């Protein structure tokens, strides 16, 4: 799901992402031990504030992990509409449960695979794990953030089939602005066709139920293709986030129970699992995979 042109201008914004350090539920209970419900949660400020389905408890996450980062993603106020890169509201108002409070560049680049890359790269950058920030282009070229931060840049040949490094200076620059410029280059030449090069398959054979964890990416490679990322989980149910085409803010998708989803096994042959999202249907173990970032 990706057709992109050359970036004419670069707009580097600020990430509006702060920790959700007020009461973030690690399970479905309030501090008093009373079961929480959707009606009892007045102000959902981050993913971890979203009430879990009845009788379920949120999976534990390691402190400082990518899973914890995703669970703490801040959300815009209820009723806020998903906006496209150019400021227009997204036409489909039924896809989003909430919208992640994170800026978007004013170019048509941050689409589905890019949103997964963006979230993982932001996590690594804020934790200063710069050496892990590297993503493949569709051509197979590996864009290494550390080389970018040390004064190198990437150019492509006239046919845009081959990329190479060249140096513009010898200064070290790990600033957020430079990081965002690097991401725009990645967004331009990466996509669902290249994303599996940066991922490992989580699913093994026909495991029942299929293993799925916070931080996993469900991807159908190709053109068109699509990718969504798991940002929270409670037992067999999970919350998904996506961007789409044209480029848009990252949204928390509506699911089978509010924003909560589950995998459904195909009944006739049991050969694959089905995951229906508001804008894409995945057939896991058939044309789509559950994967995770290699160095996660």
Image (cartoon, helix red, strand yellow):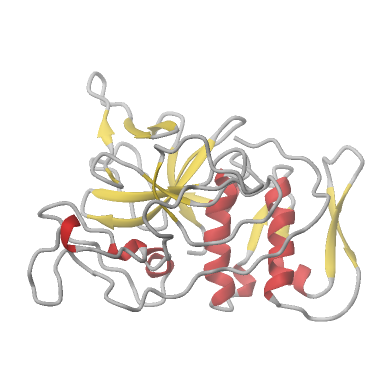
Query: Between residues 36 and 55, which one lies in front from this camera angle?
Result: 36
Q: Please tell me which residue lies in front, 188 or 77.
A: 77
What x and y, as percent, mark residue 87?
62, 49
In this picture, residue 114 sits left or right of residue 266:
right
Q: Specify the farthest residue to the top.
A: 268
Placement of the N terminus among the 4 image quadrants: top right
Relative to 9, 70 lies left or right: left
Q: Is 170 rendered above or below residue 105?
A: below
Residue occupying the point 46% across, 54% down: 292
Q: Position of residue 142 (x, y in %)?
A: 71, 55
Residue 213 sits in quarter = bottom left
The answer to whether residue 188 is left or right of residue 225 is: right
The quarter of the picture where residue 235 lies is bottom left
In front of the other: 257 or 39: 39
Taking the spot 47% from the left edge, 35% from the top edge, the residue there is 92
- At a point 17% along the width and 51% down the height, the residue shown is 53
Q: Position of residue 106 (x, y in %)?
A: 69, 53
Residue 47, image x and y in percent? 35, 61
Residue 144 appears in the figure: no
Does residue 205 sit above or below 250 in this rendering? above
Identify which residue, 32 or 229, lies in the foreground: 32
Q: Would you say 91 lies left or right of 172 here? A: left
- Is residue 90 visible in this depiction of the protein? yes
């Amino acid at each position: 799901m990706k057709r992109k042109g050359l970036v004419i201008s670069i707009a580097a914004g600020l990430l509006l992402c702060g920790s959700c350090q007020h009461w973030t539920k690690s399970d479905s209970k309030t501090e008093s031990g009373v079961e929480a419900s959707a009606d009892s949660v007045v102000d959902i400020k981050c993913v971890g504030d979203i009430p879990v389905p009845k009788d379920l408890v949120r999976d534990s996450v390691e402190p400082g992990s990518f899973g914890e980062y995703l669970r703490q993603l801040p959300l815009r106020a209820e009723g806020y509409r998903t906006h496209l890169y150019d400021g227009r509201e997204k036409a489909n108002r039924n896809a989003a449960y909430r919208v992640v409070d994170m800026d978007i560049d004013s170019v048509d680049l941050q689409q589905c695979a890019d949103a997964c890359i963006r979230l993982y790269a932001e996590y690594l950058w804020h934790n200063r794990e710069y050496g892990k920030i590297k993503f493949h282009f569709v051509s197979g070229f590996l864009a290494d953030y550390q080389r970018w931060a040390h004064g190198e840049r990437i150019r492509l040949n006239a046919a845009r089939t081959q990329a190479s490094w060249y140096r513009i200076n010898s200064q070290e620059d790990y600033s957020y602005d430079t990081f965002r410029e690097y991401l725009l280059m990645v967004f331009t030449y990466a996509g669902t066709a290249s994303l599996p090069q940066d991922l490992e398959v989580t699913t093994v054979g026909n495991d029942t139920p299929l293993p799925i964890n916070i931080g996993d990416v469900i991807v159908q490679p190709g053109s068109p293709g699509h990718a969504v990322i798991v940002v929270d989980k409670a037992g067999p149910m999970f919350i998904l986030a996506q961007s789409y085409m044209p480029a848009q803010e990252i949204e928390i998708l509506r699911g089978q129970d509010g924003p909560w989803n589950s995998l459904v096994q195909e009944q006739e042959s049991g050969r694959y699992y089905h995951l229906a999202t508001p804008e894409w249907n995945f057939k896991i173990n058939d044309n789509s995979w559950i994967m995770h970032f290699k160095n996660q």
